[in-house]
Image (tube, rainbow, N blue to C red):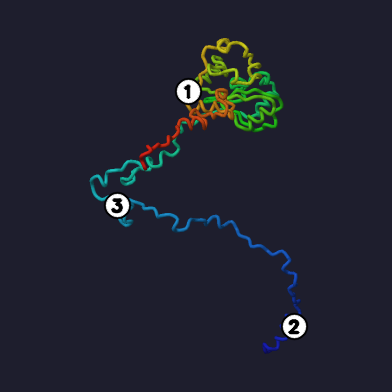
Amino acid sequence: MTPRLMGLPTQLARFAARPIHQASPLAFLLPQSQQTRTNSILASLSDTPGAYNKRIRRGRGPASGKGKTSGRGHKGQGQHGKVPAGFNGGQTKDIIVHGERGGVNIFSVDMAVVNLDRIQYWIDQGRIDPNRPITMKELYDSKCTSRPIDGLKILGDGSEALKQPIHVVASRASASAIAAIEAAGGSVTTRYYTPSSIRRILDGQTHSFLSAAWDRASGSENLHRLAKVQTTAKWSTVIDMHAKKYRLPDPTKRRDIEYYRDPAHRGYLAHLLKPDEGPSLFFKSPEERKSAAGVKKEKVLPENRLW
């Protein structure tokens, strides 16, 4: 039998015949293999143990410690009674402290909105006449906007598409829409509407913008010219000439009056403001505030008194 040591030189020669690869000094410039991670981690995601409390399963037998009477004891109000919804152990209810979540805002308004690019598209199709005042009735009859509930607001999206001057009467208008319409040579006038008056306007029973508080200065000359309103005649006569079955109401609340007195909103009551006067009904000039405060009189002492 051949000794095992005699085969050792042959094995050493086999290893010596293998090529020896040395690391290149520029090996760090070569792209490195990135570590990959499989999607199996998505199947094992969970919260940390301290992120939630363990649920107590009541009424599942005595071994759970919360079986039989479920921790409520025997008989009486403790076992059979319940507490009202939102009860916090006697302290003030959350619904009183924080109010109802998602309550109805009684001051919110449901405005139908329309952008300038849509108005221009309707004009290009011949569905709206730019040589007539554009009111909510024209926009609704041409299906340019949905049926207004509390009013109509003009927005300025697509203002670069406006090609010709237009004269708009609406409930509200954004600052960008006002700037774009006036830059094209048109005019914007905002006026007060109520839901009932809007229904009558759409039914043709009320004028679109003329009312008792509307004046010659409420709208532009081009608006009156396109609406065929004779501004040279007596104004009460003009209102009677264009009157329909119902008159258009004017605002009575302070918030509405102040909104349509603001020239920045192009309100139809802005002509009521005096020079340098604000839209607030409680506005007073510095001179008026000073006169209302009065002048403090100096105390005059007799000559024979020292104090």
Q: Earlier in the sequence, mark 2 or mark 1?
A: 2
| Mark 1 neighbour density, 10 Å: few (under 14) some (14–19) many (20 or more) | few
**Residue at label 2?**
13
Q: Would you identify the image quadrant in which residue 111 lies?
A: top right
Q: Would you identify the image quadrant in which residue 127 lies?
A: top right
Point out residue 289 in the picture as x, y percentages from the top left corner: 48, 32
**Residue at label 1?**
252
**Vertical placement of 82 versus 34: above or below?**
above
Kindly indicate whether the residue at mark 1 contacts the one at mark 2 (C-beta within 8 angstroms): no
Going by the numbered disc 3, the residue's amino acid type is Gly
Going by the numbered disc 2, the residue's amino acid type is Ala
Evaluate whether residue 108 shows in this view: yes
Nearer to the camera, 209 or 43: 209
Point out residue 17 in the picture as x, y percentages from the top left corner: 76, 79
Quadrant of the rendering where the N terminus is positioned: bottom right
Q: Would you identify the image quadrant in which residue 91 lies?
A: top left
Q: Earlier in the sequence, mark 3 or mark 2?
A: 2
Q: Nearer the viewer, mark 2 or mark 1?
A: 1
**Residue at label 3?**
71
Q: Earlier in the sequence, mark 1 or mark 3?
A: 3
How far apart in space, not on screen, are marks 2 and 1 (Cα)? 110 Å
| Mark 2 neighbour density, 10 Å: few (under 14) some (14–19) many (20 or more) | few
Q: Nearer the viewer, mark 1 or mark 3?
A: 1
Where disc 2 sits, the SS reads: helix
Left/right placement of residue 128 relative to residue 281 reads: right
Kindly indicate whether the residue at mark 3 contacts the one at mark 1 (C-beta within 8 angstroms): no
Point out residue 4 in the picture as x, y percentages from the top left corner: 67, 87
Give the residue displayed 47% in from the left and 23% down from the top.
252
Kindly indicate whether the residue at mark 2 contacts the one at mark 3 (C-beta within 8 angstroms): no
Give the residue displayed 57% in from the left and 57% down from the top.
40
How far apart in space, not on screen, are marks 3 and 2 (Cα)? 83 Å
